[in-house]
Image (cartoon, rainbow, N blue to C red):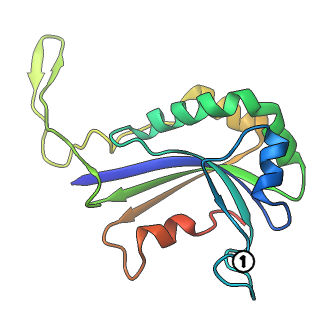
Amino acid sequence: MRVKQYAYFTAWSETVSADEVSMLLGTPPDRVTVKGSRRASPPVPTGHRWELVTDSPGLRVDEHLDALLRRLLPIEQQIAGLVADSRFTCGVQIVRYFDHPEGQVDPMTPVEIDGRTLTKLPGQHFMLSWDLPEDFISFAARTGIWVNLDEYEFPLSGESPESIAERPSRE
């Protein structure tokens, strides 16, 4: 099995542009979506999105969240301010694809525990198990952001990974 996964922080708004979010947060985004950029009426997407992304291959979900948290902590107060502002919804989206052609293959490397060598069985992919780090949970609680996890089996029925990645996660 091949597993591809990534995580991103998003600030979404129907009325506030990504440029304005950059000014409010004091940092540039990795990726933006502009309201109505694919269709004007009714607008698709339905709002503006400002995002910080971690998508390095081979990282477990908790490692993606640690990498994202290192970037979010310096702007924690600004994020809390956006969450308190009714024009915004802010959160972290975790996305996982199973059997994705660009995903990571588990090398099936034996594991040493207490001097014993344990052999992995098929299906015990190193990226399947994950947790929410305690410091990430605390950050989410302090700022009031939401956390969402989407998991997909690839190939997707009639949708490209790009179209799903562009779909608003919480509007």
Quadrant assignment, res 61: top left
Q: Residue at x 24, y 53 (%)?
A: 2
Quarter of the N terminus within the rendering = bottom left
Query: Where residue 56 appears, x then y in whole percent?
Result: 41, 41
- Left or right: where does residue 52 sit relative to residue 82? left
- Left or right: where does residue 25 sit relative to residue 44? right
Q: Is residue 140 above or below residue 88?
A: above
In the image, 121 versus 5, the foreground residue is 5
Q: Which residue lies furthest to the bottom in this view?
A: 41
Q: Residue at x 9, y 32 (%)?
A: 119
Q: Name the residue under label 1.
A: 36
Query: Where residue 35 appears, x then y in whole percent?
Result: 73, 71
Question: Label 1's element?
Answer: loop
Quarter of the C terminus within the rendering = bottom right
Query: Tag 1: Cα neighbours inside 10 Å, few (<14), some, or many (≥20)?
Result: some
Q: Residue at x 72, y 45 (%)?
A: 145
Q: Which residue is drawn at 41% across and 74% down?
A: 160
Q: What residue type is labelled 1?
A: Gly
Q: Is residue 101 above or below residue 163?
A: above
- Left or right: where does residue 89 sit relative to residue 99? right
Quadrant assignment, res 111: top left
Query: Where residue 67 appears, x then y in whole percent?
Result: 52, 32
